[in-house]
Image (cartoon, grey):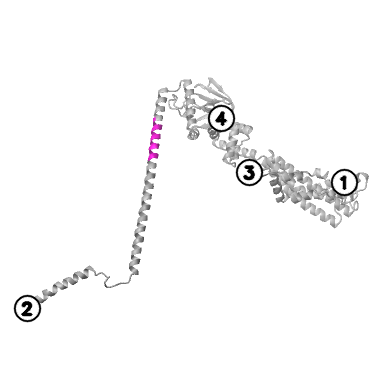
Amino acid sequence: LICITDSNKIIFLFAGYLEQGLLVTDPQKLRAHYLQSKSWRTDILCVLPTDLAYIWWPPFECDLTVPCPVIVRLNRLFKLPRLWEWFERTETDTNYPNVFRICKVVLAILVLIHWNACLYFAISYFIGFGSDNWVYNLNGTQNASLTRQYIYSFYWSTLTLTTIGETPVPENDAEYLFVVADFLAGVLIFATIVGNIGSMISNMNVARVDFQNRMDGVKQYMAFRKVGRELEARVIRWFAYTWAESGALDEERVLSALPDKLKAEIAIRVHLDTLRKVRIFQDCEPGLLEALVLKLRLQVFSPGDYICRKGDVGKEMYIVKRGRLQVVADDGYTVLATLGAGSVFGEVSVLDIVGNRTGNRRTANVRSLGYSDLFCLAKDDLLVALADYPEARATLTERGCQLLRKDGLLDEDQFRNAKDTQESMSDSIKKLESTVETLQIRLARLLAEFTASQAKIKQRLTKVETKSEKEKETAASEPPSSEALPVPQGRKRLRSFEVRREPTALSSRHKTM
């Protein structure tokens, strides 16, 4: 029975764990990982069959003897680390973490009171039941029952640890010391517990408090600027609607802690079905839809607000998420159509199609009947996303042209000319790209040839320098000789001049004589 009761410890041998984000299920690795941890020692200690001591120490006289034989099961306290681990996992997984934390704190309070009650009963036993007014009194049939003993001890422990008092006055030194220690422990423990509970309760209402502070700030601003009671009432109703529908949840701030990949997956799960309802986006590439989903922005309109007016330049398209819209005439009273959840308008204006007779301007007035939640997709965001998907852009343009043709708002000649011009420009760009590519290839060849010729020249210069150095070394190693020494040309000329000059000098002497 003991093994069956504590079989969960054996299960930990096969408990999976994450390695680099992947769940490990290999039994051999699971056992090695478990034995390398520190928890296996406490797990073994808590499953030791200490209950076998009841064979020699029967637990049938717990109401008469202290300590009771049940103390042999103290090794079960080694389960506490597993209990805290369960608390942490449950707190992480639950959708109501604050409620769970409060329940955990209450459980801790009950456990502390229980342990203190057991300690009080044990001290009463050592001092002697009924020896004075402070210890527990066993006299009487009712006081001798185990139920009454536990309830009274628990009651005494509660009054002491909560510092309420109204307990019997101690009568000896040991009792005084125990009560003083209890009071000090109660002050410290319950001050900490009350502080934690207070912070938990305040955290439960932190969103509401933040929302209320923002609304109070707007109220003070409107009162200071004297905007009028009607507009002030509309602003307050907008705040009330925002809180009722979404709890004033700031999605961007909440999801800012997540990586871009997870934010994209959440946005796809939430908004992808809404984006598929748009006719021009049906059957588009999944990559384009994922890029557009991240660009959607939620906007809330109050009753009577105009989403767009006739003649306005269309810079965004809208998808109705919740609420109802009215398409009204210029007089503001005649209702031409009513749009509900899933309706789309303004999708053609964001494509910037050449030949649109409206010039990308709104063709109708759209007004919110009540509070309406709309997804907005800006033209710039759409064009940036389509820059990476040229085929999808062509498909969307064709679908937009079909919608314009259906309403007779497309100038075919202008669209055709623009298309031809774009095609000619595309051809010119392609030719220019091919020319540039050819020039790059030629330039690369010239650079390669220049590098090869430069390397050859360096080799030749190196050989010439090496040869000249060898000749100098050879000349320096040979001994000098008179025969071998060459006569400089300057000296030869000087000697010949002197030889020619001597006869001339002799002839001049004879004449003078």
Q: For the point 38% across and 52% down, which residue is it?
A: 455
Q: Which residue is mark 4?
A: 275
The three-letter amino acid code for the residue at tag 4 is Leu
Label 1 belongs to which residue?
149
Residue 192 percent across, percent down from the top left: 72, 49
Q: Quadrant of residue 126?
A: bottom right
Element type where label 2 sits in the image: helix
Tell me, for residue 506, which label it has, or none: none
Q: Is residue 323 above or below residue 125?
A: above
Instruction: Say which quarter of the image contains residue 262.
Output: top right
Q: Earlier in the sequence, mark 2 or mark 4?
A: 4
Question: Would you call the spot at circle 3 few (<14 residues within 10 Å), some (14-19), or many (20 or more)?
Answer: few
Sequence-wise first label, 3 or 4: 3
Say which of marks 3 and 2 sits in front: 2
Badge 2: residue crowd in 10 Å (few <14, some 14–19, many ≥20): few
State the CA–CA distance, disc 2 to disc 4: 133 Å
Q: Quadrant of the C terminus?
A: bottom left
Residue 71 in the image, given as x and y percentages of width and height = 84, 50
Which residue is label 3 attached to? 21
Per the rendered image, the range of residues in magenta is: 424-438
Please name which of the two marks, 3 or 4, marks the residue nearer to the observer. Answer: 3
For the residues labelled 2 and 1, the Cα–Cα distance comes to 169 Å
Residue 50 vs residue 130, the one in the foreground: 50
The residue where tag 2 is placed is 512
**Which of disc 2 and disc 3 is earlier in sequence?**
3
Residue at image position (93%, 48%) is 139
Tell us which disc is closer to us: 4 or 1. 4
Viewer-proximal residue among 491 and 301: 491
Type of residue at label 3? Gly
Mark in the foreground, 2 or 1: 2
User: How would you classify the magenta stretch by its main secondary structure?
Assistant: helix
Secondary structure under the numbered disc 3 in the rendered image: loop
